[in-house]
Image: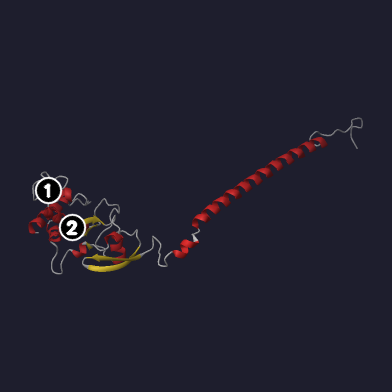
Amino acid sequence: MSMYPDRKPTKSPATGPAHNEQVDGRHDDLSLAGSARRRFLFESGALTGGLAAARYAGAAAPNVAETRDAPATSRSVGAARPVRLTINQQDYVVDLEPRVVLLDALREYIGLTGTKKGCDRGQCGACTVLVDGRRVNSCLTLAMACEGQPITTVEGLASETALHPVQQAFIEHDGFQCGYCTPGQICSAVALLGELRAGDPSAVTADLARMPVEITDDELRERMSGNICRCGAYAGIVAALRQALQRG
């Protein structure tokens, strides 16, 4: 019972039937719009996914005729295969993937750890070995590319009774300190002697018509510039090279 009998009860606009119908209609409109949007996104996503799946499935599915005619001995491009390497006058057969470089083949597969891994990008020369008499950075040389060519590492320079003249000269003239770069330095020096005997010029050769090449300190430094010694034993290396040239 109302405390004010003369006053008629009124309905709040917020709870009136007209307002409720208006609010319900707005909710219905929003609900329908949301449902339509979700349905559109779902259908477009399903269509896009179906097209992509069909495209990749078609690309991946081999031609039946091609598969039937393919040789049974086909192998993956990246699969390992036996590789014969002639290292220090001994033959080694190792299973290598095409991406394996000569440095890793020597150290990890064959166990010849005299060749050192320094920068692993062809800048320091610590990994230098001889392939068919020429010096190469083994960290940049694929092992498979050396198949059929004689490879010489620092382990193969000395004979059973004596060191190589370059090795002996490095010892006598203190051509190394920590020794990490020394295998690459020595292999590079051995190849350098052969280049000088063959008359190969360098970037600092003064007279290209003069044979044999005049051997100056600058000539030796230039030819060994691809081998870095972080200890700074360059004076001893140049002296060792001069001795090796005299005795070689």
Q: Is residue 181 visible?
A: no
Residue 14, given in percent of the width and then of the height, sits at 79, 35
Residue nearest the observer in this picture, 117 or 37: 37
Residue 224, given in percent of the width and then of the height, sits at 18, 51
Label 1: which residue? 217
In the figure, 101 relative to 214: above or below? Answer: below
Sooner in the amino-acid sequence: mark 2 or mark 1: 2
In the figure, 196 relative to 152: above or below? Answer: above
Label 2: which residue? 186
Residue nearest the observer in this picture, 23 or 7: 23
- On the rendered structure, is 29 left or right of 44? right
Secondary structure at badge 2 equals: helix
In the figure, 79 relative to 42: above or below? Answer: below
Q: Quadrant location of the C terminus? A: bottom left
Measured in 3D between alpha carbons, the distance from the residue under mark 2 to the one under mark 1, in whole angstroms, is 17 Å
Residue 34, given in percent of the width and then of the height, sits at 68, 43
The answer to the question of whether label 2 and label 1 lie on touching residues, with beta carbons closer than 8 A, is no
Amino acid type, label 2: Ile
Residue 156, given in percent of the width and then of the height, sits at 19, 65
- Packing grade of label 1 (10 A; few <14, some 14-19, many >=20) is some
Total label count? 2
- On the rendered structure, is 122 left or right of 215? right
Q: Residue at 15% of width from left, 67% of height from top?
A: 159
- Packing grade of label 2 (10 A; few <14, some 14-19, many >=20) is many
In the image, farthest residue toward the top:
6
Q: Residue at 8% of width from left, 59% of height from top?
A: 247
Amino acid type, label 1: Asp
- On the rendered structure, is 165 left or right of 146? left
The quarter holding residue 198 reads bottom left
Residue 8's disc is none
Q: Is residue 86 visible?
A: yes
Secondary structure at badge 1 equals: helix
